[in-house]
Image (cartoon, rainbow, N blue to C red):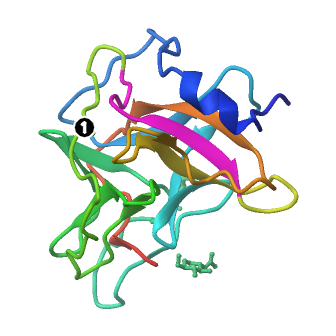
Amino acid sequence: MRFTKAIALLATASSTLAAPLQARHDATKAFTLDISFSNSPLNGPIQASNGSFYIGKPPSTSCPSDIPDCPPGNTTTFTSTSGLLHLNTEVPGGQQVYISPEGLLTYTLPHSAAIPLGSQVTGFDISPANQMAKFFDFWLCSVDAEYKVWRIWAEYRDEEGAVKQNGYTGENACTMVSLLAGDVEGDDHGAWQYDS
Ligand SMILES: *[C@@H]1O[C@H](CO)[C@@H](O)[C@H](O)[C@H]1NC(C)=O
Ligand SMILES: *[C@@H]1O[C@H](CO)[C@@H](O)[C@H](O)[C@H]1NC(C)=O
């Protein structure tokens, strides 16, 4: 494993990682967001749990008992229109994905549209040609001492223009990743709702 621990590398990091060309994103379809990074054994779709997105953790989902035919709720899938990103849910009002003022990729909770002031809600365009979630430089940062659970952060510039990536604590590891859309077969929603 070769993980970037040096915060100094942040400033020179670029998002121009090669995108696989074997598949194309169908804009009408729901999709997973799969991490892609050649130097890391980390892989698979990011999963919504407790307000953020993880590798190494199952999604936290639920469905009211009076709903027939609940979606399985064991995957995290998304839809995107006009640069906005949503979780592919059935819950009334939906659930929107955004980047918090601290740079955490996060989502609105069921029955609440609350998004903190200073969050980034647009720019989540998925390129149909290369399936990449553009415009953001994403990092995976470990949250446990065993490096089993990793959380997605976005790198951003603060008001002074300094590059920030707040997933790095000085104690953990972070690695830059691309997020690639993987089209979901069928019309099923990922879950009724994703919980906190
Ligand atoms: C869930 O998120 C909250 C707020 O960020 C945090 O305080 C709490 O520790 C998290 N719980 C788990 C189980 O990760
Ligand atoms: C999710 O659950 C469904 C129904 O039990 C199952 O068919 C499917 O393989 C599961 N998917 C994953 C990714 O675990």
Answer yes or no: is residue 149 visible.
yes
Look at mark 1 in the image and give the residue it sits on. 29
6 lies above or below 99: above
Residue 158 position in % (x across, y down) = 39, 47
**Which residue is the extreme one toward the left?**
82
Give the mark count: 1
- Residue in the foreground of this view, choosing between 166 and 137: 166
Q: Quadrant of ligand 2?
A: bottom right
* Quarter placement of the N terminus: top right
Residue 193 position in % (x across, y down) = 35, 72
- Residue in the foreground of this view, choosing between 147 and 156: 156
Residue 36 position in % (x across, y down) = 58, 28
152 relative position to 78: left or right: right
Queried whether the magenta region covers residue 138, the answer comes back as yes
**Which residue is the extreme one toward the front?**
160
Determine the image quadrant of residue 192.
bottom left
65 relative position to 112: left or right: right
126 relative position to 71: left or right: left
Identify which residue is drawn at 74% across, 33% down. Answer: 4
Identify which residue is drawn at 57% across, 53% down. Answer: 166
Magenta range: 131-142
- Residue in the foreground of this view, choosing between 103 and 158: 158
36 lies above or below 142: above
Answer yes or no: is residue 189 visible.
no
Amino acid on which disc 1 is placed: Lys
Residue 195 position in % (x across, y down) = 43, 77
Queried whether the magenta region covers residue 144, the answer comes back as no
Q: Is mark 1 on a helix, strand or loop?
A: loop
Q: Residues within 10 Å of mark 1 (few under 14, many from 20)?
A: some
Identify which residue is drawn at 47% across, 15% down. Answer: 16
Identify which residue is drawn at 45% across, 59% down. Answer: 102
